[in-house]
Amino acid sequence: MAKSKFEYVRNFETDDSCLRNCYIVVRLDGRNFHKFAEHHTFLKPNDGRALGLMTHSARCVMAELEDVVIAYGQSDEFSFVFKKTSTLFKRRASKLMTHVVSQFSSSYVFYWREFFGDQPLLYPPGFDGRVVLYPSNRNLRDYLSWRQADCIFTNLYNTVFWALVQKGGLTSAVSVVLLKGTLAADKNEILFSEFNVNYNNESAVHRKGTILIWERQEETVKKRTKSPREEKETDATVTRSRRRVQEHHCDIIGEQFWQEHPDILEQDG
Ligand code: DGT
Ligand code: MG
Ligand code: MG
Ligand code: MG
Ligand code: MG
């Protein structure tokens, strides 16, 4: 195509390619989900349907965008980590971020019914996105630890808070005052002594959030084959190794998870 005199406007685009040798983290977060959760009567403190839909949408992102090595989600947020050596979209921050967020948002709407059944989606939800670069494994692990620590802290608080309101019959205002300045041990104690709840037995998906990683799995499939020398078709079993996204709800702050999955992180170099 012949160049038009308007071509020069292209030069106004800025270069936003991410620094090489860094993990690229894209974090998205639901816009005003405090209200969205109320409008759609999410259960308090945790709604299994809402979390399930978040995780399913995150899986869609991983299926569409290769190079995501791990994703971590809790509440209305999800973080996607692209490998250090990724050259996807020439590492352009705006491309990576908008693809992640739009794929996630459209999946959230597209699969709504699978999680909420006949309960209607009342308006189109939005998600914000940001890109952060981490140059070392330590920085990346500290980032993920930060998000999981937030999940651990918030979920314990919400669990006690809603127990006081829903089971204890206290008002929100009184519960807030009661919990002010309490430590984790105090909150565990309130749950145990007042409501007979052992917090450690609460479901891990709520306490720890959701980790998505690629794992290889052996898969045996039956295949009908017919060799030229044979008359009849025969069934042969073939074993294939396939990469699948696996879901975990474990601690990622300590060493164990990283020792069990040494392929997620690249060597610092
Ligand atoms: P933002 O992100 O600044 O636009 O504002 P919000 O309202 O999205 O605030 P954020 O992201 O800090 O907090 C997430 C909100 O989403 C929080 O108010 C509780 C709500 N939410 C997330 N998951 C659930 C759930 O499973 N059940 C209920 N009831 N609420 C939830
Ligand atoms: Mg926020
Ligand atoms: Mg939000
Ligand atoms: Mg949030
Ligand atoms: Mg295009």
Image: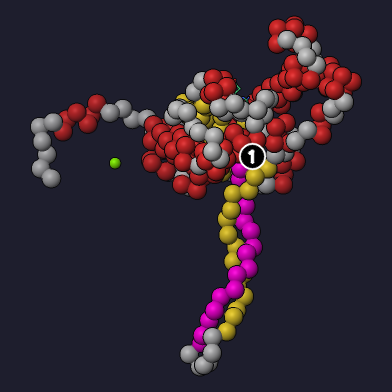
Residue 15: percent from the left, percent from the top?
Answer: 33, 30
Image quarter where the C terminus lies is top right
Residue 124: percent from the left, percent from the top?
Answer: 44, 29
Q: How is the image coloured?
A: secondary structure
Q: Nearer the viewer, residue 222 or 45?
A: 45
117 over 146 or under it: above or below: below
Residue at x-position 68% and y-position 25%:
45
Residue 96: percent from the left, percent from the top?
Answer: 42, 36
228 over 208 or under it: above or below: below
Asked if the magenta segment contains residue 128, the reply would be no
229 over 110 or under it: above or below: below
Residue at x-position 10% and y-position 36%:
4
Q: Residue furthest front?
A: 118
Asked if the magenta segment contains residue 223, the reply would be yes
Residue beneath label 1, please? 211
Residue at x-position 51% and y-position 87%:
227
Is most of the magenta stretch helix, strand or loop?
strand
**Which residues are the magenta region?**
211-227
Q: Quadrant of residue 218?
A: bottom right
Q: Nearer the viewer, residue 87 or 67?
A: 67
What is the count of numbered marks?
Answer: 1
- Is label 1 within 8 A of ligand 4 (CB to nearest ligand atom)? no
Q: Nearer the viewer, residue 145 or 49?
A: 49
- Judged left or right of residue 13, residue 170 is right
Image quarter where the N terminus lies is top left
Residue at x-position 10% and y-position 32%:
5
Residue 22 visible in the shown view:
no
Q: Amino acid at mark 1?
A: Ile
Residue 212: percent from the left, percent from the top?
Answer: 61, 42
